[in-house]
Amino acid sequence: MIFKLMSRARNIEITSRIVLSGLLALGLIARATASNSLPPTQAAFGAAYEITDATTGNSCYNKNTLTNSCACPGGTPAAADLRVINDSGGAGTQRGGHFMVCSSGAPSGSSEFYGTYQQDDAVAGGLGCRRGNAITGACSCPAGTVDVSHRTLADSSAGIIGSNIHVCTKVTSAPVSFGGSYEITDGNVCKSSNPMTGACSCPATFTKEMIRTQVDVTGGFTGATITMCVPPMQWVTICPGNTADPTGKTDVSAQINNCINATPSGGTLALPAGTYQVNSPIVINKPMSIRTQGVADTDVACGKSSSVPCATFVSSSTFSAANGLLQSDGMRNVVIDHVVVDGNRFDRLGSASASACAADHNQYGFNASVTNCATCTFQNSVSERALCGTGLQWSGSSATIKSNSFVANGDHFTHGLWSDGLTLVSADNGTISNNTAADNSDVGLIIGSSSNARVTNNMVTQTRGTAFAAFMLFSFSTSADANFTGATFSGNTINCSAGKCFYAVAIGNDPWLEAARPGAVYGGSFINNAVTGGVIGINAAGAGTSSNPVTVSGNTIATSQPDSPSNACVGSANTVASSRFNRAPDAVIAGTQVVSSSQGTVQCLGP
């Protein structure tokens, strides 16, 4: 939430840590090839990275050389999650880890990379084909490629066992997009050579990307390194006269702003898919569209399992500016479509921005802000890993915000570093639909004064991360109530796993602000929504006025909280499960459907 006017209790016990694993499906493009015996579909290579099972601190063990982080370049999601045992705890230790290979569909002939798979030894606890090759659908390489086997240890139900990671390579004398792979032990033994070079080496100009693992030897185990050979950086043209690094390793803020300035009013800037490092704000200063090149607004949204490649704006580790990487203020008819905004939170925890967040200046941790923007659109996009504040702050009438994902923003347990997913300060006459807010750390979806808005079919979940609330209607004004007259909130799914939210839904500022300032919400209908979990399922304290109540009707309220106490409130014919309902006198309650629980029921709707 943008305004933090009082300290909030944060005594909900954390039961799991957000584990950022990549998307597990490839968007493969099938094309015929007449002169090549290789299969018609292959995979563009986006390098790899390694994370560990560390329970504290940053689990990023070996970064992707193209993004300088444990993340994939835009357009090549983490399509293979290969299990390894490594020594991230120090020499002689054994810890589980994930070898994440970044790739996506590519036309035949454009890549030397043809996927990976993992095969366990035929021993007790072995899984056989642990991870198939997405291209062949099995633990195999396509015909016409070389199958390079790299040894590793992996964990199983029977303990640590042997396993092999296979990399499928088209061998050529002049590789372009993938330079092969090899493995060498700590004893400097070349365990598996690179078919591109015939040795444990990479082709000239290719960068070594090292993935740490352990292998079995007589009498025990030893450390080893699997090396993937990553192609040299190639800059792309993003508009006439401006080229940019699409790998995320170089700041390209100036080039992108040059292209925005060169785009005519009402025009479109289409950026090639890739990762663009941002060290100063990208500012949209006119009516225009910004999107990924070659992608229509009807195509699958960024971040989905079958996603098209998208342009990704990723914060540099030193980015420090109010209101985010991507900004627009006071415009009309701005369209942001099929882009990813990545706050790169883990790499910024020691930055000046993090210090500003800790001092409650949370605008320095925003991912993006679109303010005072009339008839503007944000769609098919992703905002993730904000340092603090919000994934997207928005204000302006007649907004269209649809089919986006707001994921893993902020840190619930560090003062000042919590973050909303989507923060709508005001959205009169707006349409907010089919968005996903998942595992954000303050409020997943929070909405201020928005008369005649339609907020429908959104999904707000807290399954891995903890938040104060999943969904909230709030007054951001220090002197006025929030007007939701004519607004409808319906068909939304709000789901808090046990221990992940204090409120699943909060309607009104009480007890958020208690007596700190005025700020009731009034008007509007919260109807036909599915609410699960929360210590309190729906809190409607501070909701409605005597002349303009808030209506809460036809909702399903279920429980995921086995330890919520029972309570009885006189004057109510409704029953709810142990995920309780708390209300204000001016909230109109009618027809609320309840899912009962073996933990007991609560009758709690009377004034």
Image (tube, helix red, strand yellow):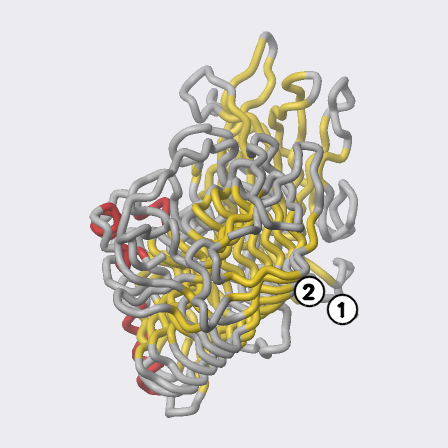
Q: Which mark is residue 535?
A: none
Q: Which mark is residue 108?
A: 2
**Sequence-earlier tag: 1 or 2:** 1
| Quadrant including the N terminus | bottom left
Q: Can you identify the residue that label 1 sits on? A: 33
Please tell me which residue is depicted at 72% across the width and 50% down the height of the picture. Answer: 134
The secondary element bearing badge 2 is classed as: loop
Please tell me which residue is depicted at 42% across the width and 65% down the height of the picture. Answer: 521
User: Which sits in the foreground, 362 or 169?
Assistant: 362
> Which amino acid type is shown beneath numbered disc 2?
Ser
For this orientation, the residue located farthest to the bottom is 265
Q: What is the x, y in percent for residue 193?
A: 58, 36
The secondary element bearing badge 1 is classed as: loop
Quarter holding residue 63:
top left
Q: Is residue 595 left or right of residue 482?
A: right
> Which amino acid type is shown beneath numbered disc 1?
Thr
- Compared with 399, 601 (above or below) is above
- Compared with 236, 125 (above or below) is above
Please tell me which residue is depicted at 30% across the width and 67% down the height of the picture. Answer: 477
Please tell me which residue is depicted at 40% across the width and 84% down the height of the picture. Answer: 374
Q: What is the x, y in percent for residue 187?
A: 47, 20
User: Which sits in the foreground, 345 or 458?
Assistant: 458
- Crowd rating for badge 2 (residues with CA inside 10 Å; few <14, some 14–19, many 20+): many
Quarter holding residue 88:
top left
For this orientation, the residue located farthest to the top is 219
Q: What is the x, y in percent for residue 399?
A: 47, 79
Say whether marks 1 and 2 touch (CB < 8 Å): yes
Q: Is residue 68 left or right of residue 573?
A: left
Q: What is the x, y in percent for residue 183?
A: 55, 33
- Crowd rating for badge 1 (residues with CA inside 10 Å; few <14, some 14–19, many 20+): some
Q: Is residue 204 visible?
A: no
Give me the C-alpha separation between circle 1 and circle 2: 7 Å
